[in-house]
Image (tube, helix red, strand yellow):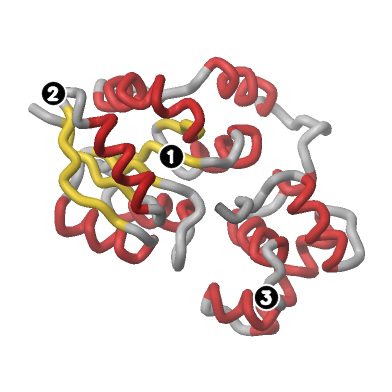
Amino acid sequence: MKTRILIVDDHPFVRQGLKAALSKSGDVEVVEEASDGDEAILKARSEKPDLVLLDISLPGKNGLEVLKQLQAEMPQVSVLILSTFPEKQYAVRCFANGARGYLTKQSASDELLLAIRKIRQGGKYVSTSLADLLADQIGADPKRLPHERLSDREFQVLCLIGQGQTVSQVAKTLSLSLSTVNTYRGHILEKMKMDTTAQLIHYVIENNLVESPR
């Protein structure tokens, strides 16, 4: 029986490339595509795929939000994260929220089918470099980067601030009140031992936490 896959990425050429790569296999079938987070949830509900190939950077709900919602509504659906972000920035957070695998788009051409098959057999797909990273995360590691101490929502707010959004824009994007976003911003500054928004923006850019324009 073929593995039924939903591809979620906001770039049409990426979706086309993934479909072309997967079409070479006789045991995989792309049943639907989605270009943003809300569409991804709707398509997953209607198509009930076996596996979702999910990008992190999406319009509307980002990949982490989609991942958590899929886990809450459809825990039987496996999620393989496919992102331009380096493993060290997002992989641990994705696995903590229920992802079954994490691939960078740079390595996808070589490892995609291998990862899908391993996940469908009940395993998790972890690259060698990611395995080393996960091993480093075991226990309380004082060398953890400041953003790794943030909650998922705080991390989301940090990334939006890093993209240059004002507090009011962040509030609108996340459907939160201004006071709530200011509270999150205060927690972020405290946890990261910083004083200004400019420092947060510099940190986000320096640590490659937002995608560069393509």
Residues 148 and 29: in front is 29
The quarter of the rendered structure image containing the N terminus is top left
- Mark 2 or 3: in front is 2
Q: Would you call the spot at circle 2 few (<14 residues within 10 Å), some (14-19), or many (20 or more)?
A: few
Q: Would you call the spot at circle 1 few (<14 residues within 10 Å), some (14-19), or many (20 or more)?
A: many
Where is residue 162 shown, x and y percent of the image? 72, 61
Where is residue 12 shown, x and y percent of the image? 34, 53
Q: Is residue 162 above or below residue 79?
A: below
Looking at the rendered structure, the kind of residue marked 3 is: Val
Q: Along the polypeptide, which appears first: circle 2 or circle 3?
A: 2
Q: Would you call the spot at circle 3 few (<14 residues within 10 Å), some (14-19), or many (20 or more)?
A: many
Q: Name the residue under label 2.
A: 26
Q: Along the polypeptide, which appears first: circle 1 or circle 2?
A: 2
Which residue corresponds to the image point at 54% horizontal and 41% vertical from the top-left?
84
Q: Residue 181 carries which label?
A: 3
Q: In this view, does 77 lie above or below 102?
A: below
Q: What element carries label 1?
A: strand
Looking at the rendered structure, the kind of residue marked 1 is: Ile
Residues 76 and 164: in front is 164
